[in-house]
Image (tube, rainbow, N blue to C red):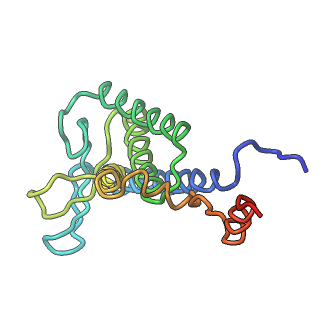
Amino acid sequence: MQRSRRVPLEARRPFAAYLSLTIALLLLDQVSKFAVRHYMEPAQTIELIGDFFHLTYVRNVGAAFGLLPGQKLLFAGTSVLVVAGILIYWIIVRPKDMLSVLSLGLVTAGAIGNLIDRIMIGRVTDFLDFFGNHFPVFNVADSAVIIGVGILLFRIMFWPEDASDSENVAPPEEPAESEEVAATSSEVPQ
């Protein structure tokens, strides 16, 4: 039987999950930003849940949550480096645990989502507004990056690399009792 692919099926499944998550989040991010740009005016606010949650259209020329405005090239370059680093890490390590797959998918989708905005329209569209003026306005991509980094930090601190690998490695086999008896009986002179 010929093998058509060099990567075994078990190694392709985590990457397929990573890619599916990345694409789904990227679509959610881009569709939500398009809807905000299409149906709302800049600085318009729509109250959804009292003083707790609004949709507020903000044109962000900075990083996540409006930090460091005007550094478009720096943020675009950082996004490209982050995505390249994740892909290189994936090729070298081939992570299999779901926390790694989830965190890397979230960070990749968020980085690409905001990169698309920076390249296509020159700024990032933010619209998720919690607590009114007491918290910065953000978007799905920002959320994905923050949650992904949080999961990754949790994974690094509380789930060591060898713990996830031990599930995939079978313990060394001990010789059966009959083999031990056979080995000792052949050594005894008769």
Say above or below: 155 vs 64.
Answer: below
Q: Residue at x 32, y 41 (%)?
A: 124
Q: Residue at x 44, y 34 (%)?
A: 85
Image x and y of residue 144, in percent? 36, 53
Q: How many marks?
A: 0
Q: Residue at x 25, y 38 (%)?
A: 63
170 sits to left or right of 82: right
Residues 105 and 175: in front is 175
Report the residue that reaches farthest toward the bottom.
50
Report the residue that reaches farthest toward the right.
1
Residues 125 and 87: in front is 87
Say above or below: 119 vs 21.
Answer: above
Q: Residue at x 25, y 44 (%)?
A: 64
Image x and y of residue 20, in percent? 56, 55
46 sits to left or right of 178: left
Report the residue that reaches farthest toward the left.
134
Report the residue that reaches farthest toward the top.
73
The answer to whether residue 34 is seen in the rendering is no
Image x and y of residue 190, in percent? 77, 64
Place residue 71 in its image quadrant: top left
91 sits to left or right of 32: right
Place residue 158 in its image quadrant: bottom left
Residues 142 and 103: in front is 103
The answer to whether residue 102 is seen in the rendering is yes
